[in-house]
């Protein structure tokens, strides 16, 4: 049997054990609540991050670059493209590019021939590039290199634009050919039909400076301006009848001609009258 002292010590021990168990349970509850708070905060941060990523996804774009290497010179060009490129623009922009194209293609200066040739290529689609290259080649007798040589210059003056369709424009212009100070410039009038489109195909950065919107001529035809030729000819004028020659009598229908002086006029029997 426990003595009084031992009983008191045992009760003290039980109270301390109960207090320790209570503290452990309280601490566990606090840790559990803290864990839930941390988990809730982490979940909130994750949710906000997901929302932010979804919101930024449309702004994220992987840009692929095309590199072109010149096999002859080893020059490397980085080609760029226009994102969401448009296929149509208003007439003011179309007129600008069509006018520039004709100035480069029909104008001429030996010092600027290489630049004009390159510019026409940048503004032309593949098939038209080939046609222009064959026409401009020195092997062609009608090439401007052969027609105008080193000293002549050809200036292009635009007169007006007429849109036959939204992608077809008729450009009327005149060319002024100067061969030297001693010769008078030769002026001719022309009408060019330009079929064009806008392309978002990759293009070298330096080419994009000349052609930022991807203007491309797909068909080109150049003819003498017949309207100017007709205007120069003027309206048809009726030729007045020639006056009668001197001393030649005028003969009127039904009236006998006067006989020469000293002769008797012949008498003609009257025509019978139909009944």
Image: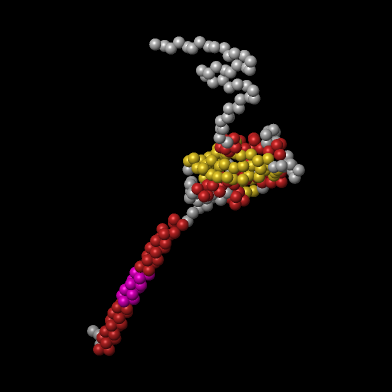
Give the side of residue 203 with respect to residue 41, left or right: right
Whole-percent x, y for residue 21 in the image: 30, 77
Assess whether residue 29 is covered by the magenta stretch. yes
Nearer to us in this view, 235 or 174: 235
Q: Residue furthest left?
A: 1
Q: Which residue lies furthest to the front in this view?
A: 262
Number of marks present in the image shown? 0
The answer, for residue 76, to whether it is visible in the render is yes
Q: Which residue lies furthest to the bottom in this view?
A: 5
Q: How is the image coloured?
A: secondary structure
Q: Which residue is drawn at 35% across and 71% down?
A: 37
Q: Residue at x 57, y 41 (%)?
A: 172
37 to 247, vertically: above or below: below
Name the chief secondary structure element in magenta: helix
125 to 257, vertically: above or below: below
Assess whether residue 150 is covered by the magenta stretch. no
Nearer to us in this view, 96 or 88: 96
- Please state the extent of the stretch shown in magenta in the rendering: 24-38
- Find residue 119 and report its image quarter: top right
Nearer to us in this view, 13 or 195: 195
The answer, for residue 122, to whether it is visible in the render is no
Whole-percent x, y for residue 79 in the image: 58, 48
Whole-percent x, y for residue 201 in the image: 54, 45
Q: Quadrant of the N terminus?
A: bottom left
71 to 47, vertically: above or below: above
Whole-percent x, y for residue 51 in the image: 39, 61
Q: Which residue is drawn at 64% across and 23% down?
A: 247
Q: Residue at x 74, y 41 (%)?
A: 183
Q: In which quarter of the image is the C terminus?
A: top left
Give the side of residue 69 with respect to residue 19, left or right: right
């Amino acid at each position: 049997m426990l003595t009084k002292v031992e009983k008191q010590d045992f009760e003290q021990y039980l109270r301390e054990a109960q207090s320790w168990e209570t503290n452990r349970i309280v601490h566990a509850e606090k840790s559990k609540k803290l864990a839930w708070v941390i988990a809730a905060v982490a979940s909130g941060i994750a949710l906000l991050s997901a929302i932010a990523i979804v919101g930024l996804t449309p702004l994220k774009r992987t840009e692929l670059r095309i590199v072109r290497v010149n096999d002859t010179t080893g020059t490397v060009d980085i080609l760029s493209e226009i994102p969401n490129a448009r296929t149509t623009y208003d007439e003011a922009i179309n007129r600008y590019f069509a006018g520039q194209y004709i100035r480069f293609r029909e104008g001429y200066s030996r010092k600027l021939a290489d630049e004009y040739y390159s510019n026409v290529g940048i503004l032309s689609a593949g098939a038209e590039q080939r046609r222009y290259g064959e026409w401009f080649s020195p092997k062609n007798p009608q090439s401007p290199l052969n027609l105008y040589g080193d000293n002549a210059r050809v200036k292009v003056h635009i007169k007006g634009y007429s849109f036959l369709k939204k992608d077809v424009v008729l450009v009327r212009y005149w060319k002024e050919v100067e061969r030297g100070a001693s010769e008078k410039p030769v002026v001719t009038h022309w009408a060019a039909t330009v079929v064009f489109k806008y392309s978002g195909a990759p293009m070298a950065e330096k080419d994009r400076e000349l052609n930022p919107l991807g203007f491309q001529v797909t068909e080109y035809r150049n003819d003498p301006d017949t309207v100017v030729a007709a205007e120069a000819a003027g309206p048809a004028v009726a030729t007045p009848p020639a006056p009668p020659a001197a001393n030649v009598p005028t003969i009127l229908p039904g009236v006998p001609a006067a006989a020469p002086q000293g002769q008797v006029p012949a008498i003609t029997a009257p025509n019978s009258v139909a009944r």
